[in-house]
């Protein structure tokens, strides 16, 4: 399996209009801008895509638009549901787009968190890998999945399946163990799932990451991996050290609400999050605007 998982991938937001309907027009304008950057690809229907707030019909609308506007970028589509049956059903509905999708990202089921043992998760992912016509990426994000994690031993076992291409790690402390158990393979990639662990991933031999900051700082994120893979590790670290504190006080300060607000200030019109998530207050947006001006981003 030839990997396309190198560089920075943006976990794309889903824009909504004033009536909270999926806004394909806004989506296409954002994607047109991303196509001109050094991003390696995009992921739709992930956490930042507010996938849990979308119906299956809306999800398919997002996928269709993404395929039309991805250009030559790699496309990852979130397909995980809370049961094996519903995930398989949604994967079946995605089959019509199989030529335009490079990978399916499957987040850990989490409603019955205490029952998500290695044995249960192995059966879940192994069955999906057997059935999927598209390579699968494991997706571990315990802060969004009721604390459920994929152990390094489980990741190593699943990495042996030829249709499991890698893992997106958004945990705070699993990167080293994952790399030790499952990293360093040509057919399995351990990707950073956040700008917070991106540099650690690169230092350990990883290929890059799927980082939310790329929604509003695409070139700044891409610069890090571009410099690193060109051998300029000091330049990559300097770029990372400049970016991380700015992300934490702007788009990364309050989840999807701050992310979309930051995108709006930087001319990526992503609208507001879907309720019940509240948008930032005017005071919070003004403070973010001030931070971006101080960093010469506006």
Image (cartoon, rainbow, N blue to C red):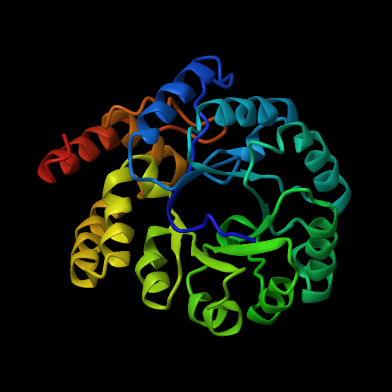
* Residue nearest the observer in this picture, 57 or 145: 57
Q: Is residue 118 visible?
A: yes
In the image, taking residue 221 as reference, residue 127 lies left or right, namely right
Q: Position of residue 19 (x, y in %)?
A: 55, 14
Q: Quadrant of the N terminus?
A: bottom right
Q: Position of residue 259 (x, y in %)?
A: 39, 40
In the image, taking residue 131 as reference, residue 45 lies left or right, namely left
Q: Quadrant of the C terminus?
A: top left
* Residue nearest the observer in this picture, 158 or 148: 158
116 lies above or below 135: below
Q: Position of residue 232 (x, y in %)?
A: 22, 68
Q: Is residue 280 visible?
A: no
Residue at the spot 58% in from the left edge and 31% down from the top edge: 67
Residue at the spot 34% in from the left edge and 29% down from the top edge: 268
How many discs mark residues in the rendered view? 0
Q: Position of residue 98 (x, y in %)?
A: 72, 38
* Residue nearest the observer in this picture, 63 or 162: 162
Task: Name the image quarter holding residue 216.
Answer: top left
* Residue nearest the observer in this picture, 78 or 260: 78
In the image, taking residue 46 as reference, residue 154 lies left or right, namely right
Residue at the spot 65% in from the left edge and 69% down from the top edge: 149
27 lies above or below 148: above
180 lies above or below 198: below
């Amino acid at each position: 399996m030839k990997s396309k998982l190198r560089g920075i991938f943006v976990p794309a937001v889903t824009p909504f209009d004033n009536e909270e309907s999926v806004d394909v027009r806004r989506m296409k304008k954002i994607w047109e801008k991303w196509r001109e950057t050094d991003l390696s690809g995009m992921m739709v229907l992930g956490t930042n895509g507010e996938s849990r707030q979308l119906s299956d019909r809306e999800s398919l609308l997002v996928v269709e638009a993404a395929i039309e506007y991805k250009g030559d970028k790699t496309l990852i589509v979130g397909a995980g549901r809370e049961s094996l049956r519903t995930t398989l059903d949604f994967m079946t509905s995605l089959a019509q787009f199989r030529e335009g999708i490079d990978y399916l990202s499957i987040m850990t089921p989490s409603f019955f968190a205490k029952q998500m043992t290695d044995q249960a998760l192995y059966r879940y992912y192994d069955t999906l890998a057997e059935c999927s016509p598209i390579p699968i990426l494991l997706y571990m994000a315990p802060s969004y999945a009721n604390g459920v994690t994929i152990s390094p031993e489980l990741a190593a076992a699943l990495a042996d399946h030829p249709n499991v291409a890698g893992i997106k790690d958004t945990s705070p402390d699993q990167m080293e163990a994952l790399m030790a158990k499952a990293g360093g393979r040509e057919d399995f990639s351990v990707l950073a799932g956040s700008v917070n662990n991106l540099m650690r991933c690169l230092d350990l031999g990883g290929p890059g990451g799927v980082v939310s900051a790329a929604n509003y700082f695409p070139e700044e994120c891409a610069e890090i991996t571009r410099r690193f893979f060109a051998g300029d590790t000091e330049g990559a670290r300097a770029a990372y050290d400049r970016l991380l504190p700015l992300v934490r006080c702007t788009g990364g300060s309050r989840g999807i609400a701050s992310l979309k607000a930051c995108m709006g200030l930087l001319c990526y019109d992503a609208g507001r999050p879907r309720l019940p998530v509240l948008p930032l207050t005017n005071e919070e947006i003004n403070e973010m605007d001030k931070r971006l001006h101080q960093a010469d981003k506006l």
